[in-house]
Image (cartoon, grey):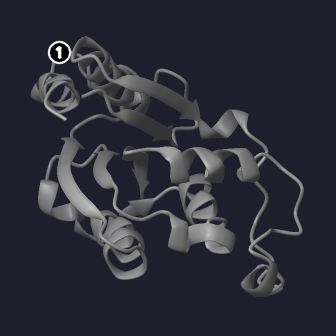
Amino acid sequence: MAKNVLILSGSFRKHGNSDLLCDEFKRGAEDAGHLVEKIYINDKNIQYCRGCGVCNNTHKCVIQDDMTEILDKMIKADVIVLATPVYFYCMNGQMKTLIDRTVPRYTEISHKDFYFIVAAADNNRANMKKTLEAFRGFTQDCLDDAREKGVIYGVGAWQSGDILNTPAMTEAYAMGKNI
């Protein structure tokens, strides 16, 4: 049965390393017959959460930007891929802002499969632990029945394109294909 897959690419560089891994995951998922949408979140207007608390009662954010549409897609998805370049051992600010802005309806992001893509210049996968802890803090601690299905480590990738011809590309395709 075809699944609805949403890929949220947090890269600031189109065709940067984490974004290339997203494309390969997408190709695998499409080859398996799934419906896939990739959102390049840097192209979207996503403002910072103001912590005003209005959404606690209304379940609607007071900020009028692209996050409302993205949040709708997250709720409708069966599978969500969160992808980020690693900046100083954590996700980049754009991805963190997106996660923060799920507050109005985060309780509706339930019963989903999650995949994480992290790309970094560092060669040591263990050094991606803090980035994964942040993703898991969102998915495991805040969401109901969020299931982590896989992590793709794009290590040793500093310049755009360094990830090409690495095992991570093969892993991204295989994970997408095997949803």
Give the side of residue 70 with respect to residue 134, left or right: right
**19 shown above or below 52:** above
Name the element at disc 1: loop
Q: How many marks?
A: 1
Q: Nearer the viewer, residue 87 or 74?
A: 74
Identify the residue under disc 1: 165
Q: Is residue 156 visible?
A: yes
Residue 171: image x %, image y %?
13, 30
Give the side of residue 45 with respect to residue 173, left or right: right
Residue at the image point whose x is 77% and y is 79% from the top:
55
**74 shown above or below 5:** below
Query: Around disc 1, counting alpha carbons within 10 Å, would you say few (fewer than 14), some (14 to 19), or many (20 or more)?
Result: few
Residue 126: image x %, image y %?
13, 62
Classify the position of the C terminus by image quarter. top left
Q: Is residue 88 visible?
A: no
Residue 81: image x %, image y %?
37, 44
Residue at the image point whose x is 74% and y is 52% from the top:
68
Disc 1 marks a residue whose amino acid type is Asn
Residue 19: image x %, image y %?
43, 29
Residue at the image point whose x is 49% and y is 41% from the top:
8
Q: Nearer the viewer, residue 65 or 15?
A: 65
Q: Nearer the viewer, residue 48 or 85?
A: 48
Q: For residue 1, which quarter of the picture?
A: top left
Residue at the image point whose x is 16% and y is 46% from the top:
123
**110 shown above or below 8:** below
Q: For residue 73, which quarter of the picture?
A: top right
Q: Nearer the viewer, residue 59 or 155?
A: 59
